[in-house]
Image (cartoon, rainbow, N blue to C red):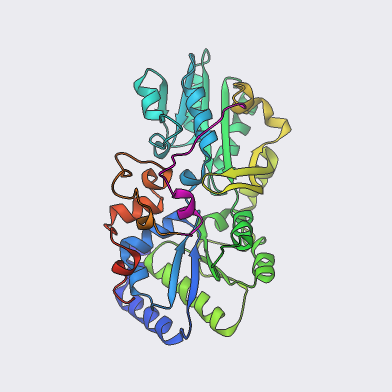
Amino acid sequence: MRYIDEFNDPDLARRLLAEIHATVTRPWALMEVCGGQTHSIIRHGIDQLLPEQVELIHGPGCPVCVTPLEMIDKALEIASRPGVIFCSFGDMLRVPGTDRDLFRVKGAGGDVRVVYSPLDALDVARQNPDRQVVFFGIGFETTAPANAMAVHQARRLGVRNFGLLVSHVRVPPAVEAIMTAPSCRVQGFLAAGHVCSVMGVAEYPELARRHRVPIVVTGFEPLDILEGVRRAVHQLERGEHRVENAYARVVRDEGNPAALHMIEEVFEVTDRAWRGIGMIPASGWRLSEAFREYDAEHRFDVGGIRTEESAACRSGEVLQGLIKPVECEAFGTACTPRTPLGATMVSSEGACAAYHLYRRLGSPKEMNPVG
């Protein structure tokens, strides 16, 4: 219980909050990059305890939420085909495509299976040599090493009926896109600790320097987030803009060399569309030429799919930090966890899901007792 209790200590939280309140002299807008951080912030009411001058903007840090609609529809098309076993993590099954989701494909007779690791999907392929097995490989840098390992193992073992539908995205290009957008209000970032545990921090100093924003690598417990806010606010008040690692118990500057080697061997950088945001150059990975035979997108020839987003869903604005979930007219009415219009409502890391789960149902002003 050490790493639960230790980072939920209320006395330490009060001390950190007191220091933040004493430090702030002007308004600042910070973006937490990770959806896991968003859920922790909303669950514990951290945004309501901060000074009114400190605004936390929810970023596009939910891997399910940013998986483009086109890729969801490709997954649905592949999963619907005869002879296919489609494997995925459970949080993807209710993400809406243009007109259905993976649960509906399963209900219509498709062989859709929830697995807990891409290596589980590889085992399914080895047990079913007469069928094509596809794993839906989504996520940020955190999940990339395991997905790369599954493909690497498939080739080493000679398993030819295994494929990966790849929709990996990378955080630093997204930070660049956010900072160069005309509507950007972000003045500092709480970077995702689990991403940096894999990748390290090498790509962040140049972003901090060029855009003159502090970037603090932060964990997910209440004290982690408060410490990240404290460090970011100190930098902003002093006119500083550098990278700090406030999650040193997990993150090393160089990242995880073994994981990085696996990613570099199996994947190559590519442009990637983000749901609700659009195309961000060099923001994703795809299988490299040496592993292209395992690319399900090519194997099943699903490149010509056209998509249409819900006109009522404003999840793109939520993902860009332009609005809070409650500012969407469909939130809590037409769009609920049972009837989601967008991935931000159904994902376990989605901002809309966090607001609905923890009953943040009023306007932003009503929800902030210190505002």
Report which quarter residue 186 is drawn in: bottom right
Give coordinates of residue 77: x percent, y percent.
50, 23
Residue at 42% x, 36% y is 96
Residue at 40% x, 34% y is 93
Residue 361 lies left or right of residue 306; in this view the side is left
Q: Do we see residue 40 in this rendering?
A: yes
From the viewer's side, name the closer residue of 108 and 299: 108
Q: Quadrant of the N terminus?
A: bottom left
Residue at 51% x, 56% y is 320
Residue 311 covered by magenta stretch: yes
Q: Do we see residue 158 in this rendering?
A: no
Predominant SS along the magenta part: loop
Report which quarter residue 338 is drawn in: top left
Residue 269 lies left or right of residue 220; in this view the side is right
Q: Quadrant of the C terminus?
A: bottom left
From the viewer's side, name the closer residue of 358 and 229: 358
Give coordinates of residue 209: x percent, y percent.
68, 71
Give coordinates of residue 38: x percent, y percent.
41, 59
Look at the picture and state if 266 lies above or below 238. above
Magenta stretch, residue numbers: 303-322
From the viewer's side, name the closer residue of 146 and 357: 357
Give coordinates of residue 363: x percent, y percent.
32, 63
Furthest residue in direction left, as rendered: 359
Residue 364 lies left or right of residue 158; in this view the side is left
Residue 236 covered by magenta stretch: no
